[in-house]
Image (cartoon, rainbow, N blue to C red):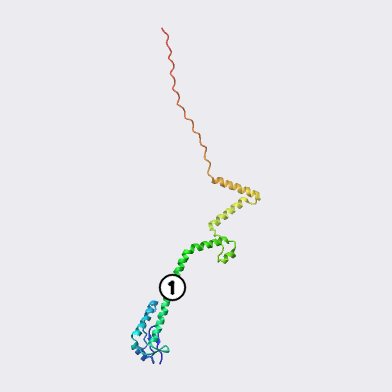
Amino acid sequence: MTSVTCHQYGVKARRDEGTVLATAFGFEPERRIPMVTRNSSRNDVIAADQHMVDGIQKNQPKLPGSFPLEGQSMTPADVIQVFQDRIATGKAVLMAESARAAAVKADRDKRAVTRATALAFKHLLIAMFAQQPDVLGDFGLHATKPAAKSAADKAQAAAKAKATRALLGTKGSRQKKAVIKAATEHSTASASPSAEPAAVAPAPSAQPAEPAKPAPAVAKPAS
């Protein structure tokens, strides 16, 4: 007799010799009985397996004592054991997923708490061994590169260098120093605020003129 092939909780009877066996289980030939959908969650799959165990145990008297499945003869107890093994491995996966989620959370929390300390130690190592790249390499670090200058800073530096060359020309070292000193003093004088005008002393207030004294009266001669 050709064995019955199980396809995801369904039994597909062979056309030639499996009709009797399929009828004994209450299935029609060439018919698949889906128990769960492909999109079912793992919990749903475990629940479906448990339903199979419960159904076999409840209806075991109605089932044959043995039957061929996938090239071997099995009893209802054998099938129960198959589904129980599936339930056990499914629950193990759920436990592993929960443990992984807890481990991931613990790692994130620990890194968030220790981030400042780790960064501070890295910066300390870079400062200590900035001139020793081989030592930094032992820690998996490398010296910090200077920040790249912006286009505006580069243009300003180029203009300053060009003005310096135009100012100094081909003068000797002493002449260059004198020119630089004069330019610096001129720049400093231009930047300093202009001197305040000298305060003008206030003019003394005019004293009021004394009133004129009346002339003395002249006595007339007696007649």
Q: Give the vertical position of 153 relative to 34 (above or below).
A: above
- Which quadrant of the view contains residue 42? bottom left
Q: Is residue 7 visible?
A: no
Residue 89 screen position, x and y as percent? 42, 79
Q: Secondary structure at mark 1?
A: helix
In the displayed structure, does residue 13 sit left or right of residue 202?
left
Q: Quadrant of the N terminus?
A: bottom left
| Residue beneath the point at 55% across and 46% down | 190
Closer to the camera in the image, 180 or 64: 64
Label 1: which residue? 99
Q: Quadrant of residue 84?
A: bottom left
Classify the position of the C terminus by image quarter: top left
Q: Residues within 10 Å of mark 1 (few under 14, many from 20)?
A: few
Q: Mark 1: which amino acid?
A: Ala
Is residue 77 in sight in this rendering? yes
Up-down relation of residue 109 to residue 15 (above or below): above
Image location (x, y in percent) of residue 55: 34, 84
Residue, x 64% and y 48% (percent of image)? Answer: 175
Q: Residue furthest top?
A: 223
